[in-house]
Amino acid sequence: MRFLQVFVMLFLPFLTMPLLAQQDYFFPEKTFFKEGVPTPGEFLGYEIGDFHTRHDRLVAYFYELARISDRIHIQEIGMTYEQRPMIIATITSPQNYNNLENIRQEHLQLIDPQVSLPAMGQMPVIIQLGYNVHGNEPSSSEAAMLTAYYLTASEDPEVLRYLEDAVIFVEPVLNPDGRDRHTNWANMHRGFPPVADANDREHNEVWPSGRVNHYWFDLNRDWLPLVHVESQARLKFYHTWYPNVVTDFHEMGTNSTYFFEPTKPFGSENPIIPRSNYDDLNNLLAPYFANAMDDIGSLYFTKEVFDNSYPGYGSTYPDIQGGLGLVFEQASSRGHLQESIHGEVSFAFTIRNHLVNSLATIKGTVENKEIFLRHQREFFGGAVKQADGHYASGYVFGDAGDRNRTKAFMDLLLQHKIKVYETGRDIESNNKTFGAGTSYIVPGNQPQFRMVATMFDTVTTFHDSLFYDTSAWSMVHAYGLPSSAINKRAWRNVSLGQQIDSTFLNSQSFPVLRSDYAYLFSWQDYNAPGVLHELQKKGIIAKTAFKPFSIETLEGIKEFSNGSILVPVEIQKMPAEELHSLMSDLAKTHKISIEAVKGGFSTTGIDLGSSSFENLEVPKPLMLIGEGISQYEAGEIWYLMDSKLGMPLTKVDILDFNRVKLENYNELILVNGNYGLLREKDVQKIKNWVEQGNTLILQKSAVTWGITNKLIAEELKVKKDTVTEDAPSLRLDYGSAEAIEGAKVIGGSMYRVDLDITHPLGFGYTNRDLVVYRNSNILLNPVKNPYSTVAVYKNDPLVSGYISSDNLQKLPGTASVLVSKLGSGRVISFVDNPNFRGTWYGTNKLFFNALFFGPIIEVPEVRE
Ligand SMILES: [Zn+2]
């Protein structure tokens, strides 16, 4: 304690600039600031840039501003997983604030083309400044505090005009959990003086990075899938206001400069967004950013890069809501001070660049506010017109065998304010029957038409071949739902039933009749694995059907497909009465039908005592994580098991693997990554353990690791890229290398595979046709054993997204899911990621199958 005091007295004066100097650095215009409003530095006890501000201190500063000033009010829109509040500050004139609900109602008229045009001259424009979605890009949240201070304290007439003409929402931290992870890292390694050497530990975070949220997800991909609490809360707020301009502040490589929009023309644009967004609005604001940066002598670039097409980005989603989303990228100091090719980059410098662009955003938006308001109005009016000319008048979807997956998709549509209806009568479309009561309709003709098209349409032609990330986002395919576009002629026969709302989604009840013999439930339902886990947790013995059957239940004859779960009553330790009440609870909480039977004699197919019902083992999984391993893919599995199964998952750091007793587990999960940290004896340990009858689950590059290390006993041929490799004499222009090489990357797209639904890994599926997500160039030939390539790429497999024609030709016939025998155990290989971004409900079942059925999968012998 004594040491600390001395330390602070001795050193702190050198760390902080004198107050005036710092004010001059961030606010050189010397505008008059109100007395009594504390600067961030006065409140925090250190100057902005000297430390990374903890989230709780940052939140406290905003509350302090709100306590002192009537220009700013705080609301909490949600809580993160780690219980940090998500705050949004409303900054506007006190008069506007007192009239806020009227302003909101009037603003919402802009998004309803049926309401007559409001008088836009008097309307404030709505600005939402969002910061720090990637937690380890921390300068922006510090800039958010300075922005809020400036707007709250400045008496400059120009600022007073902003407050009159705009309602400004400041969301200072979009990813509080990730931010604090990085904040602690940077502060705990801060030297006094700071160390600028890029090799210093301060500048090199450990796994997992602060970029991601609690579950290691990138929240700047989640605006469309809305998997996480942060995004759900954000979208809910978003749709109460429909802001006109939305910012998204980031950091990039230390040797770069600064980037603001426009992004790369055409190539990085989303074709569903009207051209006026790119041609008019972006070019309208760019000069404001340029001036702001010129004034302080900072370098920047525009137009060359940054994908702006995927609707899950925070800078793209607003473009599909009649607003303008703006991405800003600052070269990172990643820590307090770091050397770069442009000299030393200080944290304060990075903060100042984001600050001046925050203020330039406000200035540019307010000075052009009618253009933004009119754009929003025309955007939604134009959407309805665009729907008229669209090839589909609407879409029908639904999976009668899996109501929970269907409902999850509808819930997503509702969160995006898309109107959904029951089908009034059966619809025949695209050789499929969509039954009334189990299918739903989304008409194209609605203000959210562009989101409708985003959810349902597939795209296979592109302006560009370079994608920063995914090029496919048709969510109906991610949810694996049978669906069909309905053309104008067929639309005339469509009858819309009741409009779906959230009450509808929760209205059904699932009573379970009592049985003294057995209970059965289908594996087709998305929630079935969660029910099975709950049963196994209570020590209930459950079996699964390897063949289909039909049987007389207490509610009539029912059909059951492969994978259906059987829970006999008599063999359990739990008394029949208690089991019935457990079954009733599970049916209710998981919204699933559980059938009671009086006896074991089937109407068709196997009886309940058949050996084709196999006893299930309780999964005891372990997942390797840490350095070299994809935090996204590991996080997807962790999140899936927490949120969909309620199953604890042991996550072991790769550096601790040698200490783990593998015999305590029966499944080992390795996702995409570099497993070079495993030593030869670690690999041997895994091999011996699998040979003893256990299950190894590999995903993407872990599959090639398994081949290299001979864990997959069969010889797999890895298909190689051929374009340039096979033509050594080929001569190409230097300037074309980026485009040609970049085009070979499969950044993320959707493909059709043939799934063996008789294989335990295919249980719960009734259609062999399955859409998978691929974001790697790993190409594997099928295994030698003819029964073990569970899913294989079809001819002409592309469903949606970008792929080079050369790559596309190589895909058919390659394996997507396969099983290899190793001793008494097995290796399950997922060449593609079945749990991508927490949103691939359509292929999650493949992973659930590996988890629950893996231990009982046999690889059939092939007789000579
Ligand atoms: Zn970022």
Image: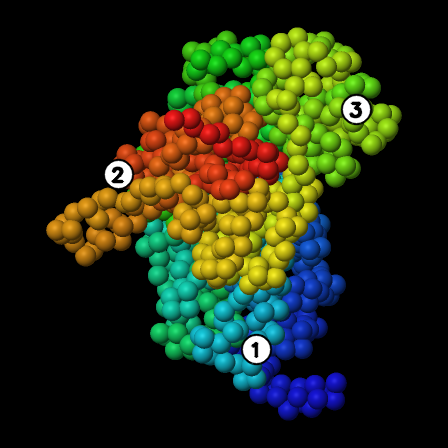
In this rendering, the answer to whether 796 lies above or below 208 is above
Q: Which mark is residue 190?
A: 1
Where is residue 258 shown, x and y percent of the image?
40, 64
User: In the rendered structure, which amino acid carries the disc numbered 3?
Assistant: Val
Q: Earlier in the sequence, mark 1 or mark 3?
A: 1
Q: Earlier in the sequence, mark 1 or mark 2?
A: 1
Q: Nearer the viewer, mark 1 or mark 3?
A: 3
Where is residue 691 shown, x and y percent of the image?
53, 45
Res. 504 visible in picture: no
Identify residue for label 2.
806
Residue at 71% over, 55% down? 83
Q: Earlier in the sequence, mark 3 or mark 2?
A: 3
Where is residue 741 shown, x and y percent of the image?
27, 50
Residue at 21% over, 48% down? 724
Q: Are marks 1 and 2 in contact (CB under 8 Å)?
A: no
Instruction: Give the CA separation, mark 1 to mark 3.
Output: 62 Å
Residue count near mark 1 (Cα–Cα under 10 Å), binned few <14, some 14–19, many ≥20:
many
Lateral position of residue 306 relative to residue 554, left or right:
left
Instruction: State which quarter of the image contains the C terminus.
Output: top left
User: In the rendered structure, which amino acid carries the disc numbered 2?
Assistant: Asp
Q: Are marks 1 and 3 in contact (CB under 8 Å)?
A: no
Q: Nearer the viewer, residue 141 or 200?
A: 200
Lateral position of residue 597 relative to residue 633, left or right:
right
Instruction: State which quarter of the image contains the N terminus.
Output: bottom right
Residue at 63% over, 71% down? 40
Q: Secondary structure at mark 1?
A: loop
Residue at 56% over, 81% down? 191
Q: Which mark is residue 569?
A: 3
Instruction: Give the CA separation, mark 3 to mark 2.
Output: 56 Å
